[in-house]
Image (cartoon, helix red, strand yellow):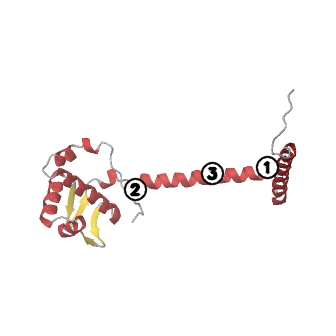
Amino acid sequence: MYGVQWFKVDRNIFNNRKIQLLLKKRDGDLYFRVWIQLLSIAVECGNDGRLGIGEKPITYGDCAKIMGKTSDKIRRIMEEFLELGMLKKEGETFLIKNWEKYQSIDKYENYQENNRQRQRKYREKLKAEGEKSNVTVTLSNAEEEKRIEKKTKEERKEEIRREEDENGFREYKLQ
């Protein structure tokens, strides 16, 4: 299992002739939903597009229970997928046809490796910049700056209070 929690869907999926044929059927939306669920199950299995539950190949009955439909309906839909060449059957095991072509895990692994290398270089760069810097800020300096800043704010408030007379009005001088 790859640990992948997603699957790719081509943005032009609705332009695919097989999907268009399925959608024109009486229960076309159901056919499409079952196809998407089969893709999801295949990702969950993590076995190169093979559909199964544990080591056991998935059956029509299993799919029916998972999808909440009758076995006959699921059998009819999956047989249509077999006829259209969307599914293959190896012995008792159903496979998503062209799984590697559309769900290439190699690209995902390359993407992850590139991200790791990029992060490593970035961290090394930050570390090198930190070592080059001759400026050090200690905790006591930062606390001193905050204390001085707080003191100046308090002094400003006190000055404002002094400018007000006993009635709370400020005296303004015209120039």
Measured along the vertical axis of the image, is residue 21 above or below residue 44?
above
Residue 133, label in figure:
1
> Hey, what amino acid is under mark 3?
Lys
Q: Are marks 1 and 3 in contact (CB under 8 Å)?
A: no
Q: CA distance from mark 2 to mark 1?
A: 42 Å
Q: Residues within 10 Å of mark 3 (few under 14, many from 20)?
A: few
Q: CA distance from mark 2 to mark 3?
A: 24 Å
Q: Where on the picture, by quarter, is residue 139?
A: bottom right
Front residue of 38/100: it is 38
Query: Circle 3 sits on which residue?
Result: 121
Q: Residues within 10 Å of mark 2 (few under 14, many from 20)?
A: some
Residue at position x 86%, y 44% from top?
Answer: 165
Is residue 128 in view? yes
Residue 57 percent location from the top left of the image? 24, 69
Q: CA distance from mark 1 to mark 3?
A: 18 Å
Q: Residues within 10 Å of mark 1 (few under 14, many from 20)?
A: few
Q: Determine the secondary structure under disc 2.
A: helix
Q: Determine the secondary structure under disc 1.
A: loop
Query: Circle 2 sits on which residue?
Result: 105
Q: In the rendered view, does 78 fall on the left or right side of 3?
A: left
